[in-house]
Image (cartoon, rainbow, N blue to C red):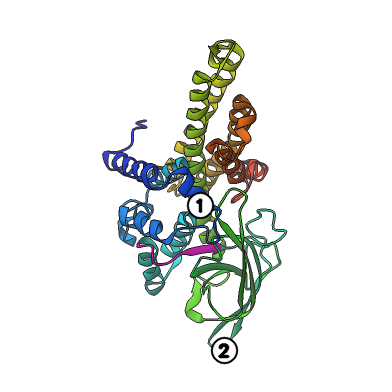
């Protein structure tokens, strides 16, 4: 198998890496990430102009990429710069629209690609513990449409979004796969309350409450009660994106640690000459390459028609990234010593992001259990 990227993907990666390095430096990033908004609209528009969002979608939906490796290239570059702009929401919501949307609903994809609309997936709920089918938010028929009531937790960029993709139960028990429906809800709709907060690793999330939110019949995405398949596919793209983002962050943490070992001296020699640290660094390099293999495997499988093959590859990658991300964080900080924990050193922010990626869209334990369950299916 040829693991080399196409020329177009290499050009995209070079363009994004250069843009992030020049326009999204460490101080700029932190000012955005820990600011009151958690994103920079001007930079978001520039990312759109560069084609970074369009690369996440196929030509049929107005993009120019859309394959698993296109998504991986974009998010690895974002991970290298710890970019906090709302790419994940654009990808997940856009993919759900592409998979199940009507012609009118798919028109939203164009505004996602040009950056004029920020979208967010409002699916996780308090106490759901990553279980995709555990949805207690209710949607009941009302005159001319639907009324939604419930609460959503940790919605990434939920306080910045103009468009929410909300999962709600139209039938069945609280943990049943049947009866879950998806709705496109304007974030400023009457009855939508949002409480935003900063993430520990930068960026913003929101708690969203829906109190008898009235939406039209055209807000239903896909067939009533059959949203779980669309949700699974959309979240699968999100899992791939997070794994690729973490890989980019690992590469920077690895590079910075190697440079530190080569320049920091004790007893008149670089500490990288100490055999114990050489062994630890060698192990770290091997683990990062294992992560890369897992991302490649997931990117190759993301479009597979075989659900079991696809979802096992994604869960295997997320498990691998969760385990190795924590290891890279711990080893990099320990080999830096006390300075590794300081706010001024970029490494501490990479370490936080790597740890927190594990908790997005299912942690290491969740995906290991899911991988095993899929193997028994």
Q: Give the mark toward the camera: 2 or 1.
A: 1
Residue that numbered label 1 is attached to: 31
Magenta region includes residue 118: yes
What percent of the width, then of the height, locates residue 214? 57, 82
**Residue 170, above or below 20:** below
Q: Nearer the viewer, residue 123 or 195?
A: 195
Magenta region includes residue 250: no
Does label 2 or label 1 sit earlier along the sequence?
Answer: 1
Provide the secondary structure element on which disc 2 rests: loop
Q: Nearer the viewer, residue 44 or 12?
A: 44
Q: Is residue 306 visible?
A: no
What percent of the width, then of the height, locates residue 329? 60, 34
Left or right: 95 with respect to 213? left
How many C-alpha atoms fall within 10 Å of the one at disc 2: few (<14), some, or many (≥20)? few
Residue at 55% over, 36% down: 345
Residue that numbered label 2 is attached to: 143
Per the rendered image, the range of residues in magenta is: 114-121
- Res. 74 mark: none
């Amino acid at each position: 198998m040829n693991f080399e990227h196409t020329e177009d993907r290499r050009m995209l990666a070079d363009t994004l890496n250069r843009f992030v390095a020049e326009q999204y430096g460490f101080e700029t990033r932190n000012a955005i990430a820990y600011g009151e908004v958690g994103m920079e609209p001007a930079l978001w528009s520039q990312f759109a102009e560069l084609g970074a969002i369009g690369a996440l979608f196929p030509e049929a939906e107005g993009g120019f990429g859309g394959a698993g490796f296109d998504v991986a290239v974009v998010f690895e570059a974002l991970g290298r710069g710890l970019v906090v702009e709302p790419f994940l929401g654009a990808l997940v919501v856009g993919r759900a629209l592409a998979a199940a949307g009507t012609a009118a609903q798919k028109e939203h994809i164009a505004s996602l690609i040009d950056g004029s609309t920020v979208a967010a997936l409002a699916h996780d709920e308090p106490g759901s513990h990553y279980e995709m089918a555990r949805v207690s938010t209710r949607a009941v028929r009302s005159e001319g449409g639907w009324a939604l009531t419930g609460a959503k937790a940790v919605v990434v960029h939920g306080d910045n979004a103009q468009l929410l993709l909300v999962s709600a139960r139209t039938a069945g028990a609280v943990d049943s796969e049947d009866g879950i429906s998806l709705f496109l809800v304007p974030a400023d709709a009457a009855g939508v309350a949002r409480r935003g907060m900063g993430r520990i690793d930068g960026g913003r999330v929101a708690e969203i409450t829906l109190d008898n939110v009235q939406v039209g019949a055209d807000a239903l995405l896909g067939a009533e009660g059959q949203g779980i398949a669309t949700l699974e596919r959309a979240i699968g793209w999100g899992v791939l994106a997070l794994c690729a983002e973490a890989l980019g962050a690992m590469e920077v943490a690895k590079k910075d640690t190697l440079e530190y070992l080569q320049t920091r001296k004790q007893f008149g020699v670089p500490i990288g000459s100490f055999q114990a640290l050489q062994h630890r660094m060698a192990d770290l390099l091997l683990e990062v390459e294992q992560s890369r293999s897992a991302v490649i495997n997931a990117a190759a499988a993301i479009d597979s028609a075989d659900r079991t093959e696809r979802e096992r590859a994604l869960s295997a990658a997320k498990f691998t990234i969760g385990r190795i991300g924590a290891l890279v964080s711990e080893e990099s900080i320990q080999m830096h010593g006390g300075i590794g924990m300081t706010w001024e050193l970029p490494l501490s922010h990479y370490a936080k992001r790597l740890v927190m990626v594990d908790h997005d869209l299912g942690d290491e334990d969740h995906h290991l259990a899911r991988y095993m369950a899929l193997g028994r299916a």
